[in-house]
Image (cartoon, grey):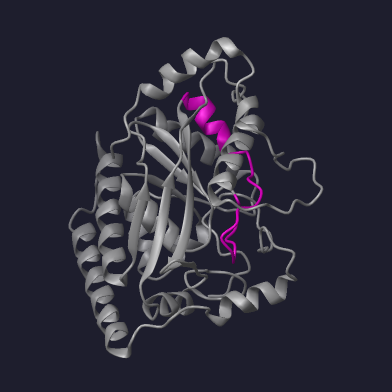
Amino acid sequence: MKTHAASSAIWPTRRMSCAGSTTHLPTCISRCAAGDFVRASTPRALFRIVRAAVAVAISILLVGARTGWRGHGRRARESAALRSIAARMLRALGISVQSIGAPRSGPSLVVANHQSWLDILVLSAAAPMVPVAKSEVGNWPVIGWLARKCGTLFVRRSCWRDLPSVVAQMTLAMRQGHRVQIFPEATTRCGGAVDEFYRSAFQAAIDAAVVVQPVALQYRQGHQSTTAAAFVGEMNVMASVRRVLTCRQLTVTVNWLPAIPAIAGTGVAAVDRRRLCELAFNAVARALNQDVIYRQQAHRPRNITSADSITNPGAIAATSAVLADGSTSA
């Protein structure tokens, strides 16, 4: 399957861009597709293929045996199943995960930069989550079936009429105590930088009165960043999977950043989705330590400092109380 915007985000379809770079787009894609990574030995790659096949088979059997989850606790069981599957698949693929910080306990909206189809597995393995994915993912062989069985929320990115329904489903899931996870860039990037966030989904956090937890994802081989996991341009899913299987010592760093309250009354100027989007975007951009090249568009997030995230000095104590209300355990 070919794709121009290999994404799990819930926003309108658009061309992939090379965020944080002035590189011409086709050159940027070609560089990522060329595979700037050290390859694993053939025996190791074959061993991973066998392990991945076994992991998929086990996942199908376990999820298939639980067909028909209904009633109270259904969403929790689906999220737990997804977490188990994600952790199993990462081990089979030989992906090492290094975490900085931890997911906040309780309901939240988890937002991250987006580079690879691995991103959902990495986040879902850390804690029970309800992912939001483009509708095409539901049609992928095996993966789509598992995603549907594990409670993934799907949306047609080309259909604006779907947005209110998806935001309502996200809000309901968070009101029921679950984490919901999205990639607000709307597409994958061939580099490690973060590009603009679309703000529509942030309304769900406001409606559910939960916090937003930004997450910065970075892929490395040794101490060097790599595009081995990138899923961009005309690359199909199987080509990307082959790259990952043949990559030696692929590590992803997951930086769980401080939560941002989306709760009225804290004094934080994040009770509208534009401001909340700006705060989340800048947190991820700072964590990645990369500049973002902006197109001149009215809806672009502006660079802000942490000092102006609170407009009322007296709200600092209230904000701290909100953030302290949840621990950082998964």
Q: Is residue 229 above or below residue 260?
A: below
Residue at (61, 64) in percent of width and height? 5
The residue nearer to you, when weighing 227 against 140, is 227
Tell me if residue 200 is in the magenta stretch: yes
In which quadrant of the rendered view does residue 146 lie?
A: bottom left
Instruction: Give the farthest residue toward the top.
Output: 314
Instruction: Give the farthest residue toward the bottom.
Output: 42
The residue nearer to you, when weighing 278 against 200, is 278
Tell me if residue 66 is in the magenta stretch: no
The residue nearer to you, when weighing 223 against 242, is 223
- Residue 41 is left or right of residue 17, and the answer is left
Please identify the quadrant where the C terminus is shown. top left
Q: Residue 208 in the image: x percent, y percent?
A: 47, 26
Q: Is residue 304 above or below residue 136?
A: above
Magenta-colored segment: predominant secondary structure: loop
Q: Which residues are magenta?
A: 185-209
- Residue 58 is left or right of residue 10, and the answer is left
